[in-house]
Image (tube, rainbow, N blue to C red):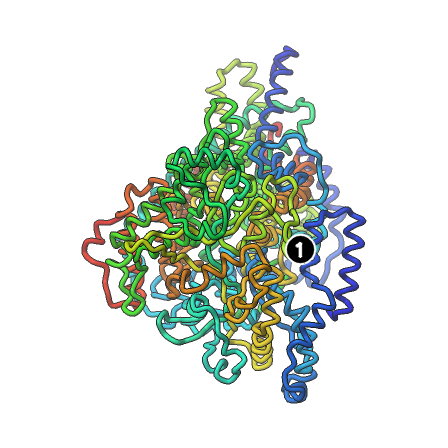
Amino acid sequence: MAQTTLPVDNQMATARQTARKRMPWARALDENRFFPTLLLVPILIFFIVWNVVPLLWLLGVSFYRYKLTAARPPSYVGFENFIDIWKSTEVWGLLGRTLSFMVLTVGGATLLGMLLGFLFWGSGKLPGRRLALTLLFTPMVLPPVAVGTFFRLIYDPIFGIANFFTQLLIGQRFDFLGNKDLAFGATIAVDIWMWTPFMILMTLAALGSVPKAELEAAEIDQIPWLKRIWYIILPNGKFILMLGILLRTIDAFKTTDLPYLMTNGGPGNTTEFVGLSLYRTGFEAFQMGDASALAIITLLVAIAFASIYLYVLSYRETRAQLK
Amino acid sequence: MTQNPWRQRLYHTLLWLIALAFFSPVLWIFLSAFKTVGEIVSPQPVFLFRPTMDNIVRVVTGPNFLEYLKMSFILSIGSVLIALVVSFLAAYSFSRYRPTGTNFIMFLLLSTRMVPASAVVIPIFLLYNVLGWSKTVHGMILFYAMFSIPFSLWILKGFLDGVSMRYDETALINGGSRLHTMFRVVLPQVKPGLVAAFIFNILFVWNEFLFNYILGGQGSTMIPVLLATGVKQGGMTDWSFIAATSLIYMLPPIIAIYIFQKYLLVGMTFGTVRGEV
Amino acid sequence: MTPRDISRVQADLLRSATERGMSRRQLMVRGMALGLSATALAGLISAYKPAAAAAQDSPLAGKTIDMTILGIAGWPPSRLGVDMANELFKPFAKETYGYDVNFAFEEAPFESLFQKAATSLQSGSAQYNIIISDSQWLGALAEPGWIVRLNDIIAENPDLDIKFEEAAAIGYRIYPDGSDNIYGFPQEGDTIALFVRQDLMSDQAERDAYKAANDGEDLPQTYDEWLEVDMDRYERVCKHFTRPDDNLFGTAFQWSKVYDFVSCYAYPFMWSNGGQTWDPATGQVEGILNSEVNIAGLEWNKKFLQYAPPGATNYGIAEEVDVFTAGTVATCLQWSALGVQMMNQVAGEAIGTVADDTRPVKPEMVLITPPPGFRQDDDSLKRIYTLGGQPWVINAFNDEDHQQVAIDYMKFWYQKDTQLEFARRGGNPTMVDVLEDPDFDAMQPQFPAFKYMIRENRSQDFWHDPNYAEMLAVQQEAWNGFLTDVVPDAKLAMDYTACKQQEILYDAGRSDIEASEACNDISI
């Protein structure tokens, strides 16, 4: 980054030159001791209108029996919606399935992403590197509708190109999305394909934040690679990598588009995840009470994950270390 | 890493193969944009075919396409710009004044991403009805701005933390106002972060479907909704429509990634670049 | 748009299309949106002339009303409901009632149309004046008071007291089941039909091979012969054409978990043998749905999977069109409304016009017949298949003006001539008068089969309860689960479905019958 490495004094000169004129209202602002708080007003407005209000609504409704398409008015039921979820074997199955989906897809994308990220790290001299990386990142920007619809075709036993290749290579065709033992894995594979590029991006960024000097020193000292990763790369890149994993974890836990479009949760219930079930409860059955309760639970799980991540990271400490 | 030209060449070939492997499903969709439906849905995959431009022409001249495309640009750019301004103000405050609970608030904001979309779309719809914002452009823009704020805030705060306090101090001592310091002195220092946050958030807004479908109306609808409604034509899957629309719709983000790639990589470092990206 | 504009736009379109070298199919699809010839239009308008004084009487005379119809995206019958409104009803309303009206079409994908409608209606919005809904949604739309109960309107407007085929008159109109509350008008009628590759059936080598393998029984050749085919014989036909090595299979049904696909194609195996869905009066499901007959029906349905292409458990409407027009299946059970698409021909054009040359199946290769019958104890054949199609309903939040226009439009829509025009363009009408028209059968290739199946209650709908979405979701999951071996046996799938549905109805206060103790141990 060119700017930050410029001699600071140069920059200061620019600052001095341009810092002449002062507006009266700007002066008033300067003397206002609430200035730091004032800067936060817009973001807090956004936060309250688009986040707190809907969340309070969700929390409130989760204590009601409230069906949008029923004639009877909402009735207060206390914790009944939560108790129903607690007792329901389906919901536990759902949560378990979602968790294993999340672990596998995030784990897969992270491992693959880190591996490929490392591989691309030294690719500075790669001819057409910019184009290669652009192509590598395209899965991320494909519209979800196109992903879901086209992968149904790609996986199709009759028309699918995936089966054309399996036929060619091992002489067999698979009903990827219709077979109960394959559908889960096939869905995960698509998700990993879509999000590995993101993890590559995060890995490259993480590697970019590793001080060059330390690496060069390690090179000179001939420190083994594993040690370099453990002692130099991870401490420096941990924060960025973990943030990438965190974002993916949150999104994977509420995955809806992909199973909805590819398998609709099938065969049977093998790819039925929390996000999909939430969509059905809230948006097909319009059971707002049940859906809100499930949403609150989902949110709590997500917050729990995030807290664990941040604890592991001990965010502040890492930042201090980086300075 | 290595001086051996053969190893170097092998290494480069491998990298290109990986990139192409990830691109290949996308390529298959792109190719389909130039095929007839019979060639797309064929028991024997069709690799060689006479490309037809019919699909592209049909999509571009189709009802609403250009209008929705324009809306995609307006909504994504508008919302992300607003998000950047709002996040920059907040990030500046968090970075420079460290108000109590900074980390907690930052975490809280990230939690907006944790709520499942299908759960909050109904309360937001009801809220919008009360405010009279449903189906309006500003309603959509403001919503997507919220969508983009948490990540922008995190990126910008990271970058601002990396900008020395001496900038602010010098500017203030030399008689610059606080606003001047913020926007004319500090802001230029975090340009890579701004660009990265911009690109990254646009990628999310660009493909958003559910909220746009429920909250948007004529005049505030983007292409993903068109894609979802156009998937079926006459009860059949309109393969060439999806392929052609996806192809056109993916070009702007792909070009953006190509042009701003450096920023994207730098941006994700949250302002902690010390080596090669 | 005035008729003049329409013809001008049409001319422009034609010119620009020929310049760009658009395919005929695309041209046709776009041309359809704009209209039919001026002569047909004039004929239609003059065909129906109410009292001449009407124009002065209408309280709306001189006003301009904008109407919005919410319908299924990419579904030609829905589109016709709007196109015909703008092309035919608009000039008609101007002349007859003296007001200007414009119709806009809001499209939503079928699976999420209800969400779009419900979120809007929930806020008391009259954004969509007329909504093309699915028949199962009637309860969910009527119960909260979102749509108009039509009994009084029909009483006031004798023109709307129309005789529909009974299956349609119940399936698209009545809620609650068994009552006489009318909430909808049939927009598009639909039934299941059998699509047959006639070229394969009449191939001499195939016939010889089939005869040799089946004690001299021949492959069915004509519509009338297919009428006599029962499920066992149909299975033999399917088996004969199942040759995975040649990439040819006997049949395809809809087995997908999406929306109501597998339910619609499994019910016939239950109903036709005497099975029931539930008791609408008491809301009892358990003990009715999971009866022996129904369990056997589900198993019977699954039996046909072995004659279907791999991947068939994900087949819905669209997948069937793809697999059939690709020449991969010899027969296919599919909605008759898809006649044109299944035959690979262009809607609205002369029968036999090929839509996509690169697809191997061409219109002349396809025969459309009623689906196979089920042999009864008295050796007769019985067919009770699932009713498809959609009603349209009127928004209860419409103001008086929009309400009036909606009613006027309905009156126009159910004129015999309008309905015949609808049929000519590919829609399936359900008015008795129209079906009995001597020209009717020849208008579309699917009409004879459709007419046969819509009559004499050979098709029926399932529940219209407001809780349909939850009931359907568990059923789809369990039945598709059984087909894909996720649920080991049919009895478990049916027991689970019945228990869950009973629970849903009881919890919602729709039924006093609680799910039995045995249900606690059942899970899939």
Left or right position of B59 against C328: right
The foreground one among C397 and C6 is: C6
Observer able to see residue A35: no
Residue B143, image quadrant: bottom right
Q: What's the residue at 78%, 47% (across, down)? A: C20
Indicate whether C11 appears above or below B262: below
Q: What's the residue at 56%, 14% (across, down)? A: A220
Indicate whether A201 appears above or below C400: above
- What crowding class fits label 1: few (fewer than 14 Cα within 10 Å), some (14-19), or many (20 or more)? some
Observer able to see residue C25: yes
Left or right position of B5 against C337: right
* Residue marked by disc 1: C349
Residue C485, image quadrant: top left
Local SS, label 1? loop
Residue B237 rendering spot, x and y as whole percentages: 56, 47
Left or right position of C436 against A133: left
Residue A47 rendering spot, x and y as whole percentages: 51, 58
Amino acid type for the residue under numbered disc 1: Glu
Residue A89 rendering spot, x and y as whole percentages: 28, 49
The foreground one among A18 and C165 is: C165
Q: What's the residue at 28%, 54% (across, down)? A: C377
Figure quadrant of the C terminus of chain B = top right
* Residue furthest front in the image: C216
Q: What's the residue at 68%, 80% (across, down)? A: C99
Number of numbered tags placed on the structure image: 1
Figure quadrant of the N terminus of chain B = top right
Q: Chain of mark 1?
A: C
Residue C490 rendering spot, x and y as whole percentages: 29, 46
Left or right position of A272 against A114: left
